[in-house]
Image (spheres, helix red, strand yellow):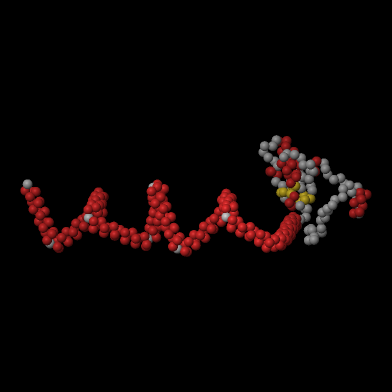
Amino acid sequence: MLREKESQRLRKFYQKKYNNNIRFREKERIRINSHVSTKYHTNLNARENIKSQSKINVLNKYHSNSDFRNKLITQSSITILNKYHNDVDFRNKHKTQSKIINLNKYHNNSVFRDKLITQSKINILNKYHSNSDFRNKLITQSSITILNKYHNDIDFRNEYKARMKTAVLKRYYTDNSIRLKMIQDALNWYRRNNTLTRQQSRQFYNQRRRILKKYSIIESHKCTSKHKNLYMENFKKFRNIIQEGPDYICISCGIALFRNQVVPFIEEKYLKQNMSFEMKEYIPSYFIDISSSELKWICRLCSDKIKKQQLPSRALLNKLEICEIPAELKKLNNLEKHLIALRLPFMKIVNLTSGKLSSR
């Protein structure tokens, strides 16, 4: 009991001194704020308690004190407006969030949707009747949209034609003045444009003939240029190939060939491990002078046949060697050779003294 009385006496004394002594009050506020700040930053439980208590106090004050509520609303509006105008990220985020909220509300709330549609119609109608620039812009945009739809949408085009035809026919049969006017206009147009139509048809015909003639000339020139370029490319390839003479002797058939007709001879390509012993012994007999260390060549025909473990048809081993020319035929001139030849070749390959063919 004595302790409680002493505690109450000290509390009253502290409260009286706090209310009457300004210096003491300021000093106590600084001390309490410092203590609370230290406890807020060092103690997690105390920080959570202070946050919860502050929220509760602000909510209670917001609901019970109208001046505080109005002041807070005004201050929040000013802060949000300043942040909206100065912070680009916040502005974009706010716009996106507002759009999402309005879209969700539009799709989920039928009352809000109907109200928004009605309000939009009223605003557009008022702006259409009061703002001439907006009206002209809307008319132009509508015309462009209808034209694009008319040219791109077949169903819309057919429907539009049928609707306009029905409307014209209805006016034609129900209104005598319009019917007479349309007949008179058609007669005047025919008298005025009959000769002109024939002239235009003749002009279109001549123009079409000129265009077709010009197109055929261009296509002919393109075709000629294409064939000429193809001929020059093939000629260049041929010139590159025959820069060297037929100096490459096949090791199997002994024919002198050009470089593009032969490949380097590598014995390991033709003697494989999975071959029989007899085949390994027999294949080297297809080749001439295989023991020489010089680079040897083999034609593609013989190479392909030997890879298939077959004897080339024109190999020297196949006994297709040319026999010796008789003495009475050795001294024939060109004319005599042509007279006795079984086959007359249409092309001859002659090895020149310089080792290269002529440039012409």
Residue appearing at x 38%, y 48% in the figure: 111
Residue appearing at x 47%, y 62% in the figure: 134
Q: For residue 315, what is the image quadrant?
A: top right
Q: Can residue 213 be seen in this snapshot?
A: yes
Residue appearing at x 87%, y 50% in the figure: 344
269 on left or right of 91: right
Residue extending farthest to the front is 176
Q: For residue 225, what is the image quadrant?
A: bottom right
Q: Position of residue 104 (x, y in %)?
A: 40, 49
Closer to us: 150 or 271: 150
On-image quarter of the C terminus? bottom right
Q: Can residue 43 be seen in this snapshot?
A: no
Q: Position of residue 351 (x, y in %)?
A: 81, 56
- Total numbered badges shown on the rendered structure: 0
345 on left or right of 77: right
Closer to us: 354 or 342: 342
Q: Is residue 208 above or below residue 283?
A: below
Residue extending farthest to the left is 2
Q: Position of residue 131 (x, y in %)?
A: 45, 63
Q: Position of residue 182 (x, y in %)?
A: 61, 58
147 on left or right of 276: left
301 on left or right of 177: right
Closer to us: 255 or 218: 218
Residue appearing at x 60%, y 56% in the figure: 179
